[in-house]
Structures are given as C-alpha cells and as structure tokens.
Amino acid sequence: MADQSRFAQRGSTEAVEEGRALAPKFDADGLVTCVATDAQSGEVLMVAHMNAQALARTIETGDAWYYSRSRKRLWRKGETSGHAQRVVEMRIDCDQDSVWIKVEQAGAGACHTGRRSCFYRAVPLGKAGAVTLEFRDEKTFDPKSVYRGG
Amino acid sequence: MADQSRFAQRGSTEAVEEGRALAPKFDADGLVTCVATDAQSGEVLMVAHMNAQALARTIETGDAWYYSRSRKRLWRKGETSGHAQRVVEMRIDCDQDSVWIKVEQAGAGACHTGRRSCFYRAVPLGKAGAVTLEFRDEKTFDPKSVYRGG
C-alpha cells in the first residue's frame, strides 16, 4: 500500500496552486513525474516516477527514491550501480503532479546505458518527415560492469 | 488520429537506446512526457505532455506544441497568453518516452499562475510527517489579464 496518508488532501485549485500544503496529484497508477537535474550544471539527468512511498522517502532521507514501472517496485537510485543521487533541493509544480529535484549525482552518470544523462541524443528541428537522432554524449562508464544483475 | 506514422517503429532495446531512429514510446494515452527548461538559466519551466501530433509539430516548426490532458486538445504554448516557447534544442531519453526541450521563453513566464516557472515552491527535506511548502518565486505577471478566456 502506498503511504498516501502522509500528504494533505487535495483542496480547491486555489489551495493546490497557492497553498503551502503538499498535496500531490498521483495519476491512475499512483505516480507523479520526477525530473532530476544536475545541481551544478543544470543538465537534465533523467525523468522517472515516484509513488507516494518513493516521494515520502526522498523527502525524509534526501536520497532520490523512485518507483520502477517495469519492475513494479520501489527503488533507491544507485542501489545497484552505486550512482546515488543526493537531493539538494526539491520543487513541486503548480498542480502538484510533477516534482523537480536538483541532485548531486554520485559516480559516472545517471543513465543505465552508461552516460551521465539519459538525454544523450538530440532531435534535429525544422524538418518534416523522418529525422535522424544525433548523439551528443559519450559513454562515461561501462554499464555491464556497473549494473551487475540488472 | 495521432500522426504516429511519421515516427519509426520501435525495435529492440538496443535499437531504441543506441540507434539513430526516432521511435517514441507513447503511453496508453498516446503521450510522452516533455520537460521544458530555460535555454539561458537552465531552470525547469514546466513539465507537460505531447502526443504524436504535438511532437511532430514541435520538431517541424521549432515552436513548443503540447497536448492538454484536461482540455483534450493540441495546444501551441503561448496561443492564448502570447508566452510562446521557441525550441533551441530537443533531446530524447534512452527509452524514448521523455523529451527535454531547451526553450527561449517569450513574455513574463511559462506558468498559468503568473510565475516564470511552474516549480515556484520548494519542498523542505529531512523531515518526517507533514511538510510546509516554501514559496521561492514571485508572480511576474497577472494571469487574469494574460489568460483571457482560459
């Protein structure tokens, strides 16, 4: 069971947007979206999801916890790779369905493919029809040696 | 109908993560998550969603288009407020279910509440139990005069 009881009940739009109560809007799957940026560079490292428990643990501990939709379980970033994220600041958006965390990224990167950021490919703009992605970031670590056992 | 045909078919995990084909993973509602950051400051301005049509139009025009889940329609950022977003760069993440756009934000801000960013409140960390949000950003415009007719 998600520990949703620790958060405030959602009130009026005015209360949600202009109030001081944390009243997250979890979606049908019980999740909010989380954007993690590098506290130094500002780079977006990853976009993931938090259920109520992951959100509560992140707030309480200052370590980034997520909910894996594919593995259907709570997950502390870095528990397998050692590439933990220490949260420097957390923000919540107007309608409280997304959080933004500025993190100190431990280790060589956040992405399971071996890059610092998950957003290592650019989409060229201004073209109609098929586009060819452009790689922007090199691998900074070998994911096979870091994610042993997945 | 979403114009999903303009994108590549999704192949193997290897192809999706290490390939040059744009093959977005739209969710059950036909959406990908989009994070918009300020191209100058790096600040996260908003998190929203794009359906296939919004993604295609953004790529083709360089203007940020989104899909409004509440209004159930395609939406060009700024069409009501004038606060358009010119996309400087678009990135896509490893599994291609999230995009990151770096934008030049026109006007006084991105948030319908009258702030530059939707993430104007901080969630204090390190506390168990109820937390009190802390306002970090002042209003930069009067939403009532900018969002006439919603």
Image (cartoon, coloured by chain):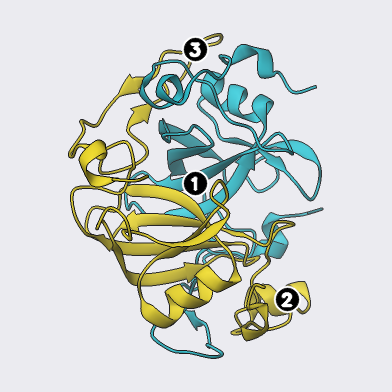
Chain colours: A yellow, B cyan
What secondary structure is found at the residue carrying circle 2? helix
Q: Amino acid at mark 2?
A: Glu
Q: Are marks 1 and 3 in contact (CB under 8 Å)?
A: no
Residue occupying image coordinates x 48% and y 46%: B36
- The quadrant where residue B44 appears: bottom left
- Cα separation between marks 1 and 2: 24 Å
Position of residue A99 measured from the top left corner of the image (x, y, whole percent): 51, 63
Tag 2 subunit = A
Look at mark 1 in the image and give the residue it sits on.
B35
Q: Residue at x 60, y 80 (%)?
A: A22
Tell me the crowding category of disc 1: few under 14, some 14 to 19, or many 20 or more residues within 10 angstroms, Cα based: many
Is residue B116 visible to the viewer in this orientation of the structure?
A: no
- Tell me if A126 is positioned left or right of A6 in this view: left
Residue B144 picture location, percent across and down: 72, 64
Give the numbered dot on residue A127: 3
Report the residue marked by disc 2: A14
